[in-house]
C-alpha cells in the first residue's frame, strides 16, 4: 500500500526525524500531518481474455475515445467468431495497454484527438496483420483444397496399383500428403500444435489423417541471441548475469521456445539446514543439489512474436469454426467447442510459469511414492528465475529411450517397469497426467546407489501440457476400465460416449449419431477379447484403434477425458513393446491399481 502512495507535509517542525512505517527517516515532517494522496490508477486494458466470464470482454475505460475503439475491436473479434475461450486461460492481453488519462473538455482536446488517431492506427495495424495472415494461410492451403477432393474421389474408383493409372494416382496421393505435412509446419506453431492435438483424437478424424498427422514434427526455428538477451533482461532484470552463465549455442528448439544450456555462478538461495540434509539422506532421498554453485541448468526462452501470432491464429480458427457451424453433418464434431478446448491448451503453453508449476506438482507427487521416489524425477525450476517468457530449470543428464533398445534384458525390464508404473500413478493415484509423453520427453539416466552400482532412473521433460480429470470423469474412467475387464461392452460404450454432445446432436435430424451400432460394436470387441483370453491392458492399442474407428464411422464423440487417458495407456503399451520386455503389462500396473482401489474405497 505504501508503495502506491505519495505524501505531502502541511507542517514542518524542528524536531528529530521520525521514522515512517516504511522504515525511512523523514526529516522535518510531523508524521501526524501526513496526508495520503493516491496516485494515478494503473493502466486499463481495453480488450482481454477474461477469466471470470470466459469471453472477449470490455474491461472498461474512462475515455470515450478509447471506449469506441475498444468496442470496434470487440466487434471485430465477434465478427471473427472467437466469442469464447476456456476459463482455463488466464487474463491475456489482446491489444496494447491503453494509458489511463482524464481529459478536460477544452484544454486536452488536442490530446484526445491524438489518442483517437493513435488508437485508430493501432486497430488498423492489427486488422492489416490479420488480413495478411489470412492471405498467407489461404495461399498455402489453396492447392490442398483444390486438388484434395479430386484425388480422394478418384481413389475410390481406382483401387488397383497394378495399372499405370493406379500407380500414378498412388504417387500423386503421396505427394499430396507430403505437401499437406509441409503446409502444417509452414503455417506456424498454432497449426503444428493443432495437428498434434488432432492426431490424438482418432474418434473424431479418419485413421488415415491421424496417422499422417502423427508424423508432423515441430518446425525447428532458432531466434537470434540478441532476442534471448533482451528477453532475459526484461524478465529477470539486469543482474541475471551475476548468477547464470548462458551458452549462446542452443541445445534444442521447438515451435514455442528455444532451449539453452547454462551454469549457475552463484547459489540463488540459501542452502537448506544441515539437519534437513541429514534427514533426506536417512530417508534415501539424497540427490545432487540443483542450486549449488557450478550446477548445470537449462534455460528456455519463448520465441519473439509467438504470442501475437498464436492469438491471431486463434481468431482465425474461431472464424472458421463459426463458418462450419451451419453444416449439420459436422455438428457431432462441435467445432466451436474443439477450438475453445485447443485454445485453452495452447495459451497455457505460452506462459512458462504454468510449466514451472506443473513440474513442482509432479515432483511433490512422486516424492510421496516410495517405490518411485528415487527412480523417477522431473527438472526442478529455479524459482528466482521463472517468468512468463523465461524458465530456468535443473539440467537433466540422460539419454533417450531408443538408445537402450539393444541393452540387456534386466535394464530394459527396469525401464519398462518405471515407465508403466509412472504413467499408471499419474492416471489413477494423482489424477494429474503428462500429456506430451513422446519419446523425446522421456530420458533414461543412471545414478549410483549405496552399493556402488548404477541404478536406472527415468526423467520426464516438458510438462507444459497436462490434464486433470474432474471427480465425475475420474469415476467414469474407473467404471469404463472395470466394464472392460468384465467384458461388458454395453456398459463400457455408454460410459465412453460424450453424453452432452450426443444429447444435443439427437435434437438435430441431420446429424443423429448411430449410438446403437456403436454399442454393439464395442460389445463385439469385448467378446473377441474374452474369446481369445486377452487382457485389455496388454492389447490396448489394438482395441482403442478399433473403438475409435467405430466411433468415427458412427459419428459418436467419445468422452475427451477417457480418450486422453486411453491414449496415454496406448503410449505406455508402445513403450513396453518397444523395449521387448518379458514382464506382463497388467502385472506391472497391479500395485498401482490396488492402491488406487483402496484409496477410492476409503
Image (cartoon, rainbow, N blue to C red):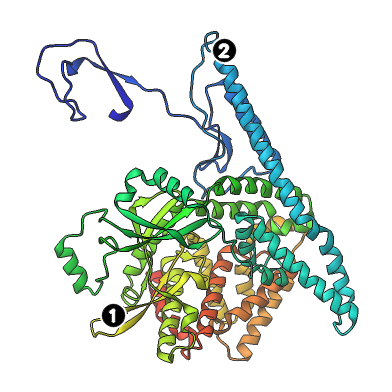
Image quarter where the N terminus lies is top left
Query: In the shown orientation, is residue 419 left or right of residue 241?
Result: right
Residue 22: quarter of image: top left
Q: CA distance from mark 2 to mark 1?
A: 74 Å
Examine the rendered structure and indicate whether residue 537 appears above or below residue 69. below
- Residue 467: mark: none
Rendered residue at 75%/51% (across/down): 138
- State the residue position of label 2: 109
Query: In this orientation, which residue lies closer to the viewer: 533 or 584?
Result: 584
Please say whether residue 406 is visible from this viewpoint. Answer: yes
Tag 1: Cα neighbours inside 10 Å, few (<14), some, or many (≥20)?
few
* Residue sitting farthest toward the left: 16
Q: Position of residue 160 (x, y in %)?
A: 86, 82
Question: In terms of secondary structure, where does tag 1 sit?
Answer: strand
Q: Position of residue 341 (x, y in %)?
A: 59, 54
Question: In terms of secondary structure, where does tag 2 sit?
Answer: helix
Examine the rendered structure and indicate whether residue 75 appears above or below residue 494. above
Q: Position of residue 76 (x, y in %)?
A: 68, 36
Dot placed on the residue nearer the N-terminal end, 2 or 1: 2
- Residue 448: mark: 1
Tag 2: Cα neighbours inside 10 Å, few (<14), some, or many (≥20)?
few
Rendered residue at 65%/35% (across/down): 125
Examine the rendered structure and indicate whether residue 90 appears above or below residue 455. above
Query: In the shown orientation, is residue 249 left or right of residue 493?
Result: left
Number of numbered discs visible in the structure rendering: 2
Query: In the shown orientation, is residue 223 left or right of residue 363?
Result: right
Amino acid at each position: 500500500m505504501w508503495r502506491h502512495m505519495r505524501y505531502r507535509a502541511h507542517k514542518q517542525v524542528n524536531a528529530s526525524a521520525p521514522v515512517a512505517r516504511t522504515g525511512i527517516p523523514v526529516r522535518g515532517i510531523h508524521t501526524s500531518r501526513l496526508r495520503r494522496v493516491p496516485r494515478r490508477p494503473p493502466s486499463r486494458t481495453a480488450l482481454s481474455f477474461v477469466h471470470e466470464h470466459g469471453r472477449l470482454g470490455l474491461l472498461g475505460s474512462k475515455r470515450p475515445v478509447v471506449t469506441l475503439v475498444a468496442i470496434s475491436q470487440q466487434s471485430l473479434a465477434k465478427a471473427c467468431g472467437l466469442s469464447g475461450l476456456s476459463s482455463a486461460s488466464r487474463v491475456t492481453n489482446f491489444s496494447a495497454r491503453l494509458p489511463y488519462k482524464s481529459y478536460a473538455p477544452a484544454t486536452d482536446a488536442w490530446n484526445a484527438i491524438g489518442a483517437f488517431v493513435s488508437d485508430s492506427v493501432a486497430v488498423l495495424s492489427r486488422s492489416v496483420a490479420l488480413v495478411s495472415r489470412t492471405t498467407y494461410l489461404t495461399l498455402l492451403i489453396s492447392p490442398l483444397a483444390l486438388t484434395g477432393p479430386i484425388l480422394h474421389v478418384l481413389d475410390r474408383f481406382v483401387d488397383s496399383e497394378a495399372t499405370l493409372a493406379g500407380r500414378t494416382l498412388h504417387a500423386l496421393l503421396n505427394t499430396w500428403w507430403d505437401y499437406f505435412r509441409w503446409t502444417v509446419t509452414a503455417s506456424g506453431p498454432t497449426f503444428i500444435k493443432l495437428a498434434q492435438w488432432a492426431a490424438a483424437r482418432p474418434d473424431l478424424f479418419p485413421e488415415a489423417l491421424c496417422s499422417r498427422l502423427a508424423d508432423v514434427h515441430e518446425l525447428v526455428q532458432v531466434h537470434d541471441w540478441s532476442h534471448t538477451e533482451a528477453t532475459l533482461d526484461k524478465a529477470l532484470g539486469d543482474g541475471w548475469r551475476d548468477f547464470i552463465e548462458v551458452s549462446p549455442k542452443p541445445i534444442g528448439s521447438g515451435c514455442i521456445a528455444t532451449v539453452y544450456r547454462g551454469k549457475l555462478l552463484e547459489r540463488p538461495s540459501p542452502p537448506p539446514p544441515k539437519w534437513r540434509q541429514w534427514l533426506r539422506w536417512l530417508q534415501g532421498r539424497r540427490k545432487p543439489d540443483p542450486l549449488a554453485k557450478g550446477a548445470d541448468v537449462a534455460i528456455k526462452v519463448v520465441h519473439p512474436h509467438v504470442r501475437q501470432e498464436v492469438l491471431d491464429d486463434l481468431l482465425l480458427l474461431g472464424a472458421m469454426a463459426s463458418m462450419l457451424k451451419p453444416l449439420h453433418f459436422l455438428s457431432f464434431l462441435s467445432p466451436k467447442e474443439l477450438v475453445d478446448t485447443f485454445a485453452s491448451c495452447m495459451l497455457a503453453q505460452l506462459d512458462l510459469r504454468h510449466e514451472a508449476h506443473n513440474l513442482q506438482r509432479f515432483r511433490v507427487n512422486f516424492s510421496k511414492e516410495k517405490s518411485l521416489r528415487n527412480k523417477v524425477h522431473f527438472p526442478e525450476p529455479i524459482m528466482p528465475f521463472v517468468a512468463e517468457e523465461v524458465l530456468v530449470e535443473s539440467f537433466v543428464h540422460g539419454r533417450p529411450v531408443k538408445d537402450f533398445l539393444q541393452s540387456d534384458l534386466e535394464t530394459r525390464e527396469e525401464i519398462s517397469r518405471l515407465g508403466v508404473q509412472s504413467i499408471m500413478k499419474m492416471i489413477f493415484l494423482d489424477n494429474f497426467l503428462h500429456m506430451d509423453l513422446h519419446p523425446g520427453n522421456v530420458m533414461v539416466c543412471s545414478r549410483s546407489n549405496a552399493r556402488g552400482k548404477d541404478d536406472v532412473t527415468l526423467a520426464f521433460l516438458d510438462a507444459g501440457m497436462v490434464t486433470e480429470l474432474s471427480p465425475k470423469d475420474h469415476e467414469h474412467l474407473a467404471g469404463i476400465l472395470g466394464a472392460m475387464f468384465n467384458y461388458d461392452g454395453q456398459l463400457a460404450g455408454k460410459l465412453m460416449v460424450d453424453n452432452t454432445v450426443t444429447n444435443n446432436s439427437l435434437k438435430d435430424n441431420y446429424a443423429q449419431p448411430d449410438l446403437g451400432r456403436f454399442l454393439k460394436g464395442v460389445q463385439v470387441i469385448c467378446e473377441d477379447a474374452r474369446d481369445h483370453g486377452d487382457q485389455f491392458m496388454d492389447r490396448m492399442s489394438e482395441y482403442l484403434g478399433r473403438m475409435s474407428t467405430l466411433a468415427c464411422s458412427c459419428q459418436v464423440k467419445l468422452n475427451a477425458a477417457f480418450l486422453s487417458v486411453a491414449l496415454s495407456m496406448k503410449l505406455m503399451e508402445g513403450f513396453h513393446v518397444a523395449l521387448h520386455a518379458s514382464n506382463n503389462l497388467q502385472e506391472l500396473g497391479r500395485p498401482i491399481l490396488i492402491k488406487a482401489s483402496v484409496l477410492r474405497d476409503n
